[in-house]
Image (tube, rainbow, N blue to C red):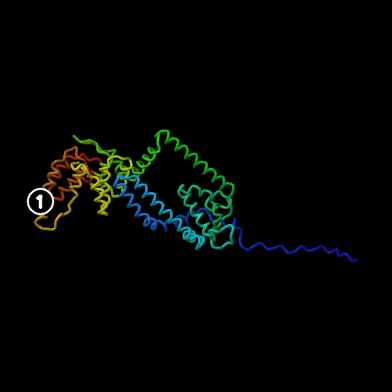
């Protein structure tokens, strides 16, 4: 019996797949952020169109003073926008495994339990989209996991068992420094949030006060002219210092602020629950491009107080002819002229400054510069914008 001492040759090793491992083709955080921005730009116009009926309902509810209807309209509008975003993501994830923004950046969403390139299941796409919207509602803070997770998967990817790969610029798992950075950001966020909430609740005593302060801060940041005018206003002889809403209306009549600023001031006043007549008057002026809505606000502003300065201002602004008959129209115009001049003659230093500015403009339109100058001379300018208006007139 012959024994073969030739050593056995091991079988040839199996070649690894030619495509790189998933962990080496992960999408970069910057590309994912850029894709989200691109999707936002694409969806925003459609979302504005879908939510516009509910915005109108909220405005009408605010006009009626119905908090319940306003809340329902606001929630319905947000719900419509949310459904649009979910439908957008689900449709394109099933069709392309990527939203248009991701496809533009060369990214694809792959399921860990399916072959790469397989169509995504509708259930996974829906779960992923719902979780993504929930994270967006938290200001996108959970997306920090893109930096720290071993496969760069935020919560919505982990929940749906998906991973985002890149065909252009890919990267591997995070290093120790990235994981440490993500952990530090999470800790800093929660610590800062607890400190801020604790301080606000401790000093203000209620969440409503916190929201009121935030509302006032947003107004101050958006309407600097109103802030400055309110601080600089100096009451003249016999005058009293006007309220912030009155200052805003005065600057608007002097063409020193625009519709958006006036609307923001009005919404802030309505939120705080004060000076509703001035706030409704301001909304009526700012909504001048929508006759029906504007008229509704003006009627609300003047309801039950016909002798107020707001009603007098509306009377000065009302130039609608009530008849087409030439004789009657002329008689009505003569009567209106007399009423306007009588109204202007009744003004005192205690009259609202926006009414006096409106009267000055009315007198100039009627070619009565002498009377306009009398009102201008008795007016205490309060800001650079108002001073410019008075000097130019």
Task: Out of 237 and 88, give the one closest to the viewer.
Answer: 88
Is 189 rendered above or below residue 96?
Answer: above
Q: Residue at x 27, y 42 (%)?
A: 276
Q: Residue furthest bottom?
A: 2
Task: Out of 353 and 234, give the one closest to the viewer.
Answer: 353
Neighbour tally class for label 1: few under 14, some 14-19, many 20 plus, Cα within 10 Å:
few
Image location of residue 143, percent across then percent down? 50, 50
Is 267 rendered above or below residue 50?
Answer: above
Image location of residue 211, percent across then percent down? 38, 40
277 horizontally vs 99: left or right: left
The residue carrying mark 1 is 334
> In the rendered image, which quarter contains the N terminus?
bottom right
Numbered marks: total? 1
192 horizontally vs 238: left or right: right
**Mark 1 residue element:** helix
Q: Residue furthest right?
A: 1
Image location of residue 184, percent across then percent down? 53, 43
52 horizontally vs 237: left or right: right
- Location of residue 50 (image quadrant): bottom left
């Amino acid at each position: 019996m012959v024994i073969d001492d030739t050593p056995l040759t091991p079988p040839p090793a199996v070649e690894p797949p030619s495509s790189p491992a998933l962990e080496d083709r992960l999408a970069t955080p910057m590309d994912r952020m850029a894709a989200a921005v691109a999707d936002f730009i694409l969806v925003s116009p459609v979302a504005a169109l879908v939510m516009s009926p509910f915005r109108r309902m909220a405005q009408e509810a605010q006009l009626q003073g119905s908090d319940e209807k306003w809340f329902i309209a606001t929630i319905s509008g947000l719900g419509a926008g949310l459904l649009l975003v979910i439908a957008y993501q689900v449709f394109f994830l099933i069709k392309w495994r990527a939203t248009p923004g991701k496809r533009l950046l060369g990214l694809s969403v792959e399921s860990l339990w399916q072959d790469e390139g397989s169509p995504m299941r509708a259930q996974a796409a829906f779960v992923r989209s719902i979780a993504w919207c929930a994270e967006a509602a938290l200001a996108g803070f959970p997306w920090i996991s893109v930096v720290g997770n071993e496969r760069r998967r935020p919560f919505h990817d982990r929940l749906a068992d998906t991973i985002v790969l890149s065909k252009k610029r890919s990267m591997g798992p995070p290093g120790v420094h990235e994981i440490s950075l993500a952990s530090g950001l999470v800790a800093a966020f929660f610590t800062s949030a607890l400190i801020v909430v604790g301080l606000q609740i401790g000093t203000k005593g209620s969440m409503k006060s916190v929201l009121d302060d935030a509302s006032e801060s947003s107004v101050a940041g958006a309407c600097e002219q109103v802030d400055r005018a309110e601080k600089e206003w100096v009451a003249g002889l016999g005058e009293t210092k006007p309220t912030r809403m009155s200052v805003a209306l005065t600057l608007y009549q002097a063409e020193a602020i625009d519709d958006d600023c006036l609307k923001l001031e009005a919404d802030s006043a309505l939120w705080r629950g004060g000076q509703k007549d001035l706030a409704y008057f301001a909304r009526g002026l700012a909504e001048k491009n929508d006759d029906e809505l504007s008229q509704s606000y003006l009627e609300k502003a003047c309801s039950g107080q016909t002798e107020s300065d707001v009603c007098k201002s509306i009377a000065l602004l009302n130039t609608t002819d009530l008849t087409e008959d030439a004789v009657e129209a002329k008689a009505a115009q003569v009567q209106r002229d007399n009423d306007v001049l009588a109204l202007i003659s009744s003004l005192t230093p205690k009259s609202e400054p926006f009414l006096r500015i409106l009267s000055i403009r009315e007198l100039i339109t009627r070619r009565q510069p002498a009377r306009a100058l009398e009102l201008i001379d008795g007016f205490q300018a309060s800001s650079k914008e108002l001073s410019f208006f008075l000097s130019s007139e």
